[in-house]
Image (cartoon, rainbow, N blue to C red):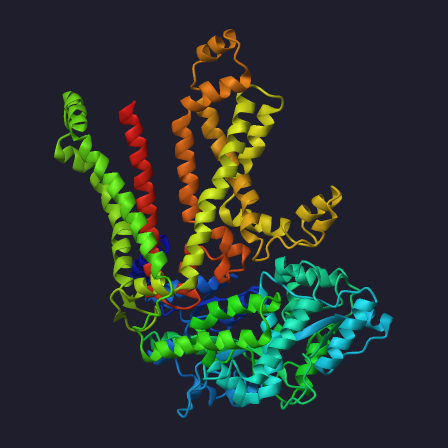
Amino acid sequence: MRLICFILCCWCCGWLRGQTATTEAKAVAGPCVVVDIPVLVAGYGAEFFEETARAFEKLRPGVEVRLYGDPRINDRVRIRVMAGDPPDATDAVLLYPRLIEAGKILDLAPELDGPNWEGDARWRDTFRPGVLDRWRSNGAGAVYGLPFAHAVWTIFYDKALFRRHGWSVPRTWDEFFRLCDAMQAAGVTPLSLPGVTMRYGDAILRAAFYNLAGDEGYNAYHALAPGARSDPRFVRAAEVLQRVATRYLVRGWEGMTHTAAQQTFIEGKAAMTLSASWFANEMRGKLPPDFELGAMNLPVFADGISLPDTVQAQSGYYFLFKSGDAAKERATIDFFRYLTSRERARRFASQADAPVALVAAKVGDYSARMADTAALLERSPGAFDAAPAAASAAQATLSQALTDLRYQLMTGRIGAAEFGTRLEAAAEVERRRMQDPDHVTVRHAGKAAGLGILVAAVVAWMVWPRRRRKGAQEEAGAATSRLGRLRNDFGAGFVGPALGIYAAFVLLPGLAAFGWSLVRWDGFGEMRWAGLFNFRWLLLESDVFWSALGNNLFLMLVPPLVVVPVALGMAAFIHRGGPGAGVFRVVLLFPNLLGGIAAALIWLAAYEPTSGFINAALVAAGLKGFAGYAWLAQANLYWSLVPIYLWMACGFNLVLYLAAMQGVPEELYEAAELDGASATRQFFTITVPLIREVLVVSAVFLVIGGLNAFELVWLLTAQDPAAGTHTLGTFMVGALFNEFQAGRASAIAVVLFGLVLVASLAVLRVTRQEAVER
C-alpha cells in the first residue's frame, strides 16, 4: 500500500515539477533546453556518461543535460513513467512494446538515415551489423531503440592457470565437459557462478539452445510459440545447464552474489567464471596487475546449426520519449548523436574497458585484459540477442515461473525434460489467458475458504465482546465526562491540518489503490475493468501467493520467539547491573542506527560462502562442515534471516524492556528478597508480570513487521525471489515492476492491508480487554 501511495505522490509531483519548470523557463533570459536522462550505471559506472554530458553542453551552450543514475534506476523510472512524468530518454528496463504501441516513443529511423555526428556517413551505418534490428518494427521500418554499450556473454578464464596445466580453450560442449573433469582431477574447481543472481545461468541455456535451434527456434521461444519449451532441442540445452550447475560449480555457489562469484575466480578458487563483458570494469581495482584474463566464447554442439563464432550479445538500448516539445526532442537526438560519435565510442571502449555497439571501436582501444573479448567481436559473423524485443512483453509474465524452475533445474531437483514440460505448461497458461483474460484455474479453494473463515472469526470475536460490555463502557464514559468535552471548532483546528495532509498523501492514494485492484493495467497503457478477477486469481490460482503468505507467517512467529526472550534476558542483565552493562547497551543498540538496506548489505557480505566472516568464524571454531556453506541459498534463506532479525531488533526491544523494568518499584524486589526469593523467582513473579504490556506491544511490532517484510528478502535474493522465498511485499513489487501487473500488485496491497488491519485490531482488542478487566 505504501508503494502505491508513493506512485500516486510521484504522479502529483510530476505535475508540480512541470509547473515549476515552466515558471523557471519563463524567468530565464534567453533560450535554454533542459534534457532529462536517467541512466542505468550497473556495470559501467556513471563517470563516462557525465563526462559526455558536460562535453556536449560546451558544444551546445543552449542545452543543459541532466544526466544521472544509479544501479536501482529501473524502479524509479518505472514509477515516473506510470505517473505520467517520463524522462526525455533512458535505458531503464520498461515495457517498451506497450509504450511503442501507445505512441510514446520516438521513431528514430528518419534520424538514423541522416548524417552521423561527424557528418561523413549515415548515422545508422556507424552501428554494428544487426544491433538496430532488435527494436525495429515489422514492416514499417521504424527504429525505436538506440544501442550503445554492447555486452558480450563469455566464459572468463585464468590464462596462467591454463598454461601451467596445459589446458586448451574448448570449442564444443563435449570438450568443455572433458576440460572440467580434468580440472577436478587436478584439484581445481572449474567454474564460479552466482546463485543469488541465478539468472546468470540463462546465458548457458540461451547459447546452447540458439546453437541447436537457430534464429527461427530461438525467436519462436521468445514469442511464446506453442511447443518451444518442450522442444527436444530446448531440453537438450537445459541438460547442459544442469550438468554444469550440479557437477562443476564452486562449493556454496547457491549463496553467492555475482560479485562474490567473480571474486572467487580472481582469488584462484575457480579456473573460470561466467559473466558478460562488464566484468573487467566492474572488478577494476580487484584484479591483480599481473592477472592474465582470458575470454572464450560459449561452446557449441558438434551438430549445432549456428556458426561457432556467433556471440551472445546484450546491448544497452536508449529510448527517447515524445514530449511534444520539438526543441527538446531535437536536443535529445543531438545528444545521442554525439554520444555515438567515433571519439565517444572509442573513449567508452578505453575508459570502461567494455565493448560498444559502434564499429568505431577497434581491438586496440581495449586493454590487454579485454583483448580476447574484442577479438571475439571482430571475428564474429554476427550476434544473437540475449533478450529479444519479443521477450519484453510476452515473457514478462513468465519471469516468476522461469525463476522457480531454473532453481529446481540447477539444483538437481527436477530433470531437464520436466523443466521443459513445466515451463511449457506455464507458457500455455499465459497463452490461454491472452485468449480468455478472465479465466481462473481453481487450485486453492480450501485455503481461500480457510483464510476467509479465520478472518471472519477474528472480526466476530472483536465485535461480540464489545456488545456484552456496553454498560461498562457507558459507565467509564460517564466518569470521564466530568473532564468536559473539546469544542468541535477547537478540535478541528488542532486535528484538521494534520488530517488534511494525511488524507492527501495516504488516504486518497490508498483509496486509489483499491480502485486499481479492480482493473487490468500494465502501468503504461489503458486501464480495463477486471472486477474481482485479481483477487480471484490470487486466492484461487496463484501458488506464489500462498507460499508468500506462509513465509510471512514464518517471519511473524519465529523471529519474535527468538528476539523477545534474548532482548528480555539482556535487559534483565543490564537492569541488575551486570558487568559491562553500559557497553552491552551501546553495542546492541548500534544496529538500529542503520537502515534496512544498509543492514541487508552488511549481512549479504557476512553470509558470503567463501569470504564471509560467518563461515570463517564457524570453521575457525572447528565446525568444518560450514566451509563454503550457502546461507543465502533458497532452501536456507528464511532460517538465515533469524540472526539478522535478532541483530536488528534486539537493541530496540532491549531499551523498551529496560525502561519498563526501571519503572518497577524497588520495594517489591526488597520484600521478595526478604522472603527468600531468588533472582530468577523475582524475575518471573515480579518483573515479567509488571512489564507484560510492554512485552505484548513489542511482540505486536515484531509480528506486524513480519507481515510487512520486504527489504531483507528483496535484497538478499537480488530482487528476483523464487516462489519459495517470496513474501507478500516482494510478491507485490515483483508483480508491479517485473511482470508489469499494476492491478495485480494493487490487489496484493489490498489483501496485505486487510491482514495487517485485522491483526492490529485484534491485538488492540486484547489489550483493551485486559485493561478493562484490571
Q: Which quadrant of the view contains residue 621?
A: top right
On the image, the x and y values in percent for residue 159 come to 79, 72
Outermost residue toward the front in this view: 446
On the image, the x and y values in percent for residue 46 come to 55, 64
On the image, the x and y values in percent for residue 483 come to 17, 21
Q: Horizontally, is 416 left or right of 704 in the view?
A: right
On the image, the x and y values in percent for residue 537 come to 34, 65
Q: Horizontally, is 670 left or right of 493 in the view?
A: right
Tell me which residue sits at (68%, 83%) in the image.
300
Camera-nearest residue between 66 and 532: 532
Residue 402 in the image: above or below residue 216? above
Q: Can residue 288 be seen by looking at this rendering?
A: yes
Outermost residue toward the bottom in this view: 139
Residue 75 in the image: above or below residue 463? below
Quarter of the figure with the N terminus: bottom left
Residue 704 in the image: above or below residue 511? above
Q: Which quadrant of the view contains residue 42?
A: bottom right
Quarter of the figure with the C terminus: top left
| Number of numbered tags placed on the structure image | 0
Camera-nearest residue between 647 and 418: 418
Tell me which residue sits at (72%, 50%) in the image.
625
